[in-house]
Amino acid sequence: MTVREAIAAAAQRLAANPALSASAARDAELLLLNELSITRASLLAHPDRELTPPEQLRYKASLTRRLANEPIQYILGQQEFYGLPLHVTPAVLIPRPETEHLVETVLHRSPKDQPLRILDIGTGSGAIAIALATHLPQAQITAVDLSPAALAIAQENAQTHAVSQRIRLLQSDLLSAVAGERFDVIVSNPPYIPAADRASLHPEVRDYEPEQALFAGQAGLDIYQRLIPVAYDALVPGGLLALEIGCGQREAIADLLSGWHGVSFVDDLQGIPRVAIATRPD
């Protein structure tokens, strides 16, 4: 079987799954590139190259995982975020493009030449912390997560991008491990999906991504209700709080931020309020 034939056959099988049809051709190609450890340019230059039996077996195994709705990012072990390739496993939430708006919002409000103290709550793969450390060279970042497995992935990614010396990783339930410390910026992409929405989620998300990184009670607000009060106490006067929020949560988050200054929201590219920002009063 040639490269061309293998991709065509795989794409046809993927397209037969309604949940995967939109990305069938792309996924078929990415899976083969990964198994062969070649570039797309090499693939295009040699479409009639014969696959060896071991290569065919490995490709079939990857295809089987994808046909079972496993996210392709977990199969490939990688996801790009804010221009940075990150290692991902089922221990961490797959970084989303929507979260890049959160990073952009913090960067827009953070001077690059100041030694800011930043806290990233629920760091997962380290995506937010690493992106901020990369673009704020004077910042010192503390990144916390409840999951030791997630922290191990974040440490690996921080080392890959040469920012591990400026990112302190701690196992923590919200701010429990940094009690008494003060920060200039607190940022978080917490779980915010209502438990009632579980059944309607894409099987890629519902069946494979870590549950503790997705769901937050019946209304999806449980973590915000715990986080916002303790974040207030942990920020310096005038400090910035930036949170990713879910669809339809703007009003509830605005209520939780009553008493803060400068409460505002940033829309994503679909016009959905995606980031909530506020500052602690002086």
Image (spheres, rainbow, N blue to C red):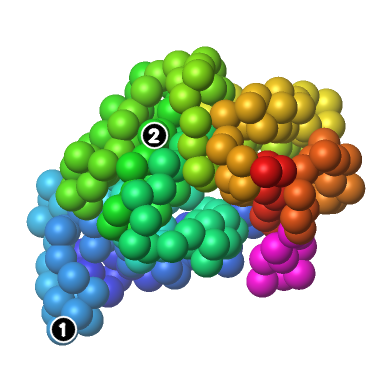
Residue in front for this viewpoint, 14 or 258: 258
Q: Quadrant of the N terminus?
A: bottom left
Q: Which residue is mark 2?
A: 142
Q: Percent position (x, y) of residue 157?
A: 27, 43
Residue in front for this viewpoint, 234 or 256: 234
Q: Is residue 7 above or below residue 95?
A: below
Q: Quadrant of residue 228?
A: top right
Regarding residue 67, the answer to whether it shows in the image is: no
Q: Which residue is mark 1?
A: 45
Q: Residue at x 70, y 56 (%)?
A: 274
Residue in front for this viewpoint, 262 or 168: 262
Q: Quadrant of the C terminus?
A: top right
Please rate how many residues cluster around mark 1, counting C-alpha atoms within 10 Å: few if below 14, some from 14 to 19, many from 20. few
Residue occupying the far front of the picture: 282
For marks 1 and 2, give the CA distance.
Answer: 46 Å
Q: Percent position (x, y) of residue 122?
A: 51, 32
- What amino acid type is highlighted by mark number 1? Ala
- Residue 175 shown left or right of residue 282 in the figure: left
Q: Percent position (x, y) of residue 5?
A: 29, 70
- Residue 229 shown left or right of residue 70 in the figure: right
**Residue 270 is a magenta residue:** yes
Q: Quadrant of residue 195?
A: top right
**Residue 282 is a magenta residue:** no
Query: What are the residue bounds of the magenta stretch?
Result: 265-273
Number of numbered labels in the structure image: 2
Q: Percent position (x, y) of residue 10?
A: 39, 60
Q: Is residue 218 above or below residue 34?
A: above
- Earlier residue among tags 1 and 2: 1
Q: Quadrant of residue 166?
A: top left
